[in-house]
Amino acid sequence: MHIEQAAVIIDDYDSAIEFFVQALGFELIEDSPSLTNDGRPKRWVVVRPPGAITGLLLAQADGERQRSAVGNQFAGRVGLFLRVDDFDASYRRMLDHGVEFVTEPRDEPYGRFAVFADVAGNKWDLLGPR
């Protein structure tokens, strides 16, 4: 058993794809036309880290209630955790792509980490080895 994917509510499909693929190094797994429950067009967009099983469904906000959740899916807390093998290389790549870091990198017993915001404003931990 595993979690196949989790949804991240975004403002715009293309800017979110660019962020996750270019800045974070994720793979674009699927970008297919789809329909909302009431028949309006949307896209089914899934990204995931290379070699990972669990992906993120990039769900463009539809309606005011969903728009109000963009960037606040975790009530201001860190809600997603990205573990990388090479913290320094990942951190540099993300800085080069304009990723906003909320904290400076620091070492903790569980490894090196820093908090960053994704394209929607949700907070993530970037986690490296001890």
Image (cartoon, rainbow, N blue to C red):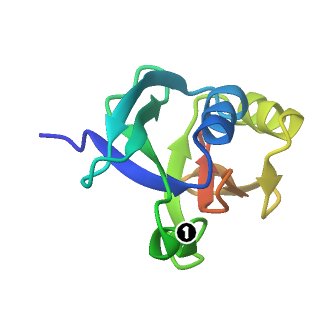
Residue 109: percent from left, percent from top: 58, 57
Q: Give the residue drawn at x 55%, y 68%.
A: 67
Q: Give the residue drawn at x 31%, y 49%.
A: 36
In the rendered view, would you say 95 is above or below 61? Answer: above
Q: Nearer the viewer, residue 64 or 56?
A: 64
Q: Quadrant of the N terminus?
A: top left
Q: Nearer the viewer, residue 77 or 130?
A: 77
Q: Give the residue drawn at x 62%, y 41%.
A: 16
Q: Give the residue drawn at x 40%, y 41%.
A: 41
- Residue at disc 1, secondary structure: helix
Disc 1: CA contacts within 10 A as few (<14), some (14-19) or many (>=20): some
Residue 82: percent from left, percent from top: 54, 44
Residue farthest to the left, as pictured: 1
Q: Nearer the viewer, residue 58 or 83?
A: 58
Residue farthest to the front, as pictured: 39
Residue 107 image-quadrant placement? bottom right
In the rendered view, would you say 46 is above or below 62? Answer: above
Q: Nearer the viewer, residue 5 or 70?
A: 70
Q: Which residue is mark 1?
A: 67
Residue 99: percent from left, percent from top: 79, 46
In the rendered view, would you say 74 is above or below 115? Answer: below
